[in-house]
Amino acid sequence: DGGITQSPKYLFRKEGQNVTLSCEQNLNHDAMYWYRQDPGQGLRLIYYSQIVNDFQKGDIAEGYSVSREKKESFPLTVTSAQKNPTAFYLCASSSQGEEKLFFGSGTQLSVL
Amino acid sequence: EDQVTQSPEALRLQEGESSSLNCSYTVSGLRGLFWYRQDPGKGPEFLFTLYSAGEEKEKERLKATLTKKESFLHITAPKPEDSATYLCAVRVYSSASKIIFGSGTRLSIRP
């Protein structure tokens, strides 16, 4: 079945540590997105990519980095510069000409 | 600034008690409005896309409508399995790559 796979489901970060969240899709979608969701708040855009080897900052990119070396993959690194990383992280994708987003099941990141 | 506001924040209904969720938006140019359903600890699941005022979409007990300033998600005779957070989002012409989300309405249906 086609879809978006996020891993791990739960992740714990120690102070000063960088962690990477995985996002893989087999939908052949061009665009991929990373959102952050805090309790009681809407989704906020971290980074997005419309094509391989190209990506743009969203509204809250500070403390995060991404890469898009393959169409299927869009990993997100939460760096030590992100002082409040505890949140639910969602990866999404969409195809050209189709407006809606398809979401993965999310990664819950917590700080030890 | 483009903005999406959902109300109420939370809504508790009795099974079979119909109601509506509101999504008001202030955007420079609406390209599309989306409704998603999100269960706890999971990613949002797509429900509807609306493009122009007067448009309506239906799926089982849900019906979405759109005006020039807001959208409503009507829930008719809800069941406990309809309990979830419902998210509204918009795409705008000024930045078609971005989708702006509201903070959601937490719907709880009591049996």
Image (cartoon, coloured by chain):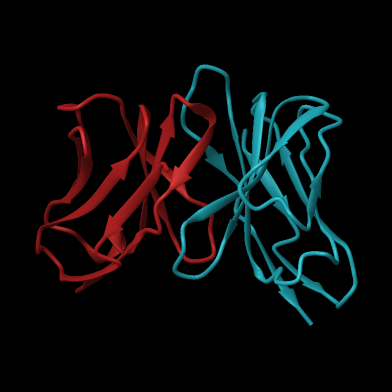
Q: Residue at x 60, y 53 (%)?
A: A105
Quarter that holds the N terminus of chain A: top right
Q: Residue furthest top?
A: A97
Q: Residue at x 51, y 17 (%)?
A: A97
Q: Residue furthest bottom?
A: A112
Residue A54: % across, % down:
78, 27
Q: Residue at x 43, y 30 (%)?
A: B92
Residue B57: % across, % down:
22, 32
Q: Is residue A21 left or right of residue B10?
A: right
- Nearer to us in this view, A20 or B17: A20
- Nearer to us in this view, B68 or A52: B68
Residue A74: % across, % down:
76, 39
Q: Residue furthest right?
A: A17
Among the 4 quarters of the image, the one containing residue A47: top right
- Nearer to us in this view, A9 or A40: A40
Compared with B106, A50 (above or below) is: above
Quarter that holds the C terminus of chain A: bottom right
Compared with B51, B12 (above or below) is: below
Q: Is residue A22 left or right of residue B97?
A: right
Q: Residue at x 44, y 61 (%)?
A: B39
Q: Is residue A15 left or right of residue A62?
A: right
Q: Colour of chain A?
A: cyan
Among the 4 quarters of the image, the one containing residue A24: top right
Q: Colour of chain B?
A: red
Q: Is residue A76 visible?
A: no
- Nearer to us in this view, B30 or A6: B30
Residue A29: % across, % down:
64, 25
Q: Is residue A52 visible?
A: yes
Compared with B111, B104 (above or below) is: above
